[in-house]
Amino acid sequence: MITIEAVNKFYGIYKALDDVSLDIAAGEFFSLLGPSGCGKTTLLRSIAGFDTPSTGDIRIDGQSVIGTPPNRRPTNMVFQSYAIFPHLDVEENVAYGLKRLKLDASEERRRVGAALDQVRLGHLGKRRAHELSGGQRQRVALARALVMRPKVLLLDEPLSALDKKLREEMQVELRSLQKAVGITFILVTHDQYEALALSDRIAVMFGGRIAQVATPKEIYQRPTTRQVADFLGGMNFMKARITGETATRLSVETPRFGGVTLDKPLGFSARNGTATIGIRPERLRVLWDDARSDFEVAGRVVDRHYFGEITHLIVDIPGMEQPLSVSETNNFGADDIPVGDAVRLAYDPDALVALSD
Ligand SMILES: Nc1ncnc2c1ncn2[C@@H]1O[C@H](COP(=O)(O)OP(=O)(O)OP(=O)(O)O)[C@@H](O)[C@H]1O
């Protein structure tokens, strides 16, 4: 539905977008995720028409939109700062963009009512902006975009001004709203949890380039580069010696995790016969008492951080360069393991991933 083809964007000599190509399907909830300055807003603004790529093409439903002004594109953008008019009430705010369509009054009222119902603000139509909470204002901004019936809704960090609890509530709402209206949503966020919780697919960006595009589960469980793995949650990294290589698989020998064969990440090239291997902290489990596993490593707890439902244990493993970070639930008392204690950790070899540097 949306095709981004070899898009580059220069600001002077600075390259904000570097050869970006991407296909986004109709009805998809798609997120652009990355650290500040990685180019995600520039890409979103290019889809909306507020920025123009220096080279490359953007097509919506097969039609190039380069040169088409924002208001003539089948897109609508919701900004981070809920830009709603303070002197208008909620209904007037939502009706604002409809004015140029010159609908008859009853049709306009019907569409405004439907958009407000979609964001659960039907009862607050006569309120003014200063009488609304942050979450309600953001819903007005959403209704204002939805009322225009865009094919694509573009969302630039729409929830970042909200506090954590409200933000989580609005995330759930945004997801169900997207399913209900069925249009394509493209969300820009630097919040990995937001992207994981909301998206059908995520593109992770660094330095103007797309590092990986995949479903939340794939991107979390099978990151292809060290940078992607590090940006989305914690990851223990270790060096391993390559003992065999095919087009798609890599056999490695690790100091403490033994020999394993793994999927070869995209764009992988071996340096000095070594590869970087990763395992997520929550994929390591403490083995209590006499419990045994075919796959275990032994070490000593050197630090402990309590997070309520989980505890992070930092475990030094003899022969490993870096201690392992272990995220263990407190159901079994991980929060009571004293620093200095010997522990054994079980792991599933399937949880190990090979990463491109
Ligand atoms: N109008 C501009 N002129 C010059 N440089 C710009 C302009 N707009 C953006 N940039 C630069 O391009 C890069 C990408 O900016 P962009 O806003 O797309 O990043 P971002 O990933 O959305 O970051 P953030 O999350 O901080 O908004 C940044 O380094 C930024 O400084």
Image (cartoon, rainbow, N blue to C red):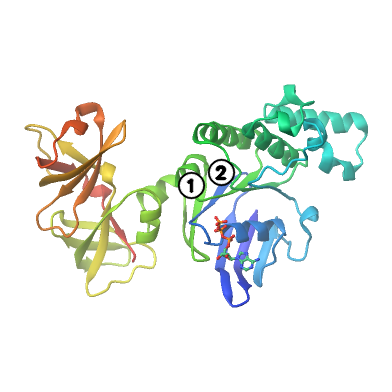
**Label 1 sits on what residue type?**
Asp
Q: Farthest residue toward the top?
A: 123
Q: Quadrant of residue 61?
A: bottom right
**Label 2 sits on what residue type?**
Ser
Task: From the top left corner, tell me how far across and down residue 162 is, in percent.
Answer: 57, 38
Residue 108 disc label: none
Residue 191 disc label: 1
Q: Farthest residue toward the bottom?
A: 13
Residue 160 disc label: 2
Label 1 within 8 A of ligand 1 by Cβ: no
Report the front residue among 226 and 65: 226
Ligand 1 image position (quadrant): bottom right
Q: Earlier in the sequence, mark 2 or mark 1?
A: 2
Label 2 within 8 A of ligand 1 by Cβ: no
Report the front residue among 218 and 303: 303
Q: Is residue 139 left or right of residue 90?
A: left
Per the image, label 2 sits on a secondary structure element best described as loop
Tell me the quarter of the image containing the C terminus.
bottom left
Task: From the top left corner, tell me how far across and down residue 96 is, in percent.
Answer: 83, 40
Does residue 225 show up? no
Residue drawn at x 13%, y 36% is: 338
Q: Is residue 120 left or right of residue 198?
A: right
Gap between marks 2 and 1 measured at Cα: 9 Å
Relative to 334, does residue 77 appear above or below in the rendering? below
Task: From the top left corner, tell me how far across and down residue 52 is, in percent.
Answer: 70, 66
Residue drawn at x 65%, y 38% is: 182
